[in-house]
Amino acid sequence: MTNRYKQKSVTLRIPTHDKLYDLSKTIVPGEYKSIPATIDLLVNEKVSTPESRRNLGATNDSQTKETK
């Protein structure tokens, strides 16, 4: 049987799950996100293009070297 939802499961340590639960209440102000939605947001933010990361205030090594 195929997985029609195209999902996978992961195993998390309890402290990590607890942190995700807390983060899911604060990652989008005024809105509760499920833990899977929180993981999606974090992963998508992390692998986004450098330009969009720059808008979020994150940098990578190449950006840091260029600005010095």
Image (cartoon, rainbow, N blue to C red):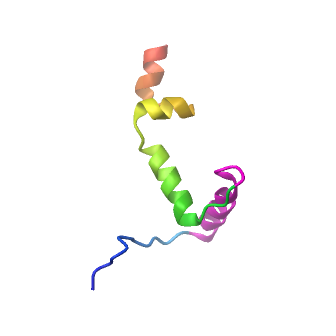
- Quarter occupied by the N terminus: bottom left
Q: Is residue 42 above or below residue 54?
A: below
Pinpoint residue 39: horizontal percent, then vertical percent.
52, 58
51 on left or right of 26 = left
- What is the magenta segment's predominant secondary structure? helix
Residue 12 position (above or below residue 61): below
The front one of 28 and 20 is: 28
Magenta stretch holds residue 15: yes
- 31 left or right of 5 in image: right
The foreground one among 41 and 30 is: 30
Residue 19 position, x and y percent, is: 65, 60
Specify the quadrant of the image occupied by residue 50. top left
Residue drawn 44% across and 19% down?
65
Residue located farthest toward the top when viewing the structure as drawn: 68
Residue at point 70% right, 49% down? 29
Please state which of residues 45 and 12 is positioned toward the viewer in this rendering. 45
Figure check: 24 above or below 46: below
Q: Residue furthest bottom?
A: 1
Count of numbered circles on the image: 0
Q: Which residues are magenta?
A: 13-30
The structure residue drawn at horizontal position 52% and vertical position 52%, both measured from the top left corner, is 41
Q: Is residue 47 above or below residue 53?
A: below
- Where does the image place residue 26, in percent across and percent down from the top left? 69, 53
Image point (58%, 65%), residue name: 35
In x, y percent, where is residue 31? 68, 56
Q: Is residue 5 magenta?
A: no
In the drawing, does residue 50 fall left or right of residue 41? left
> Of all residues shown, which one is farthest toward the left?
1
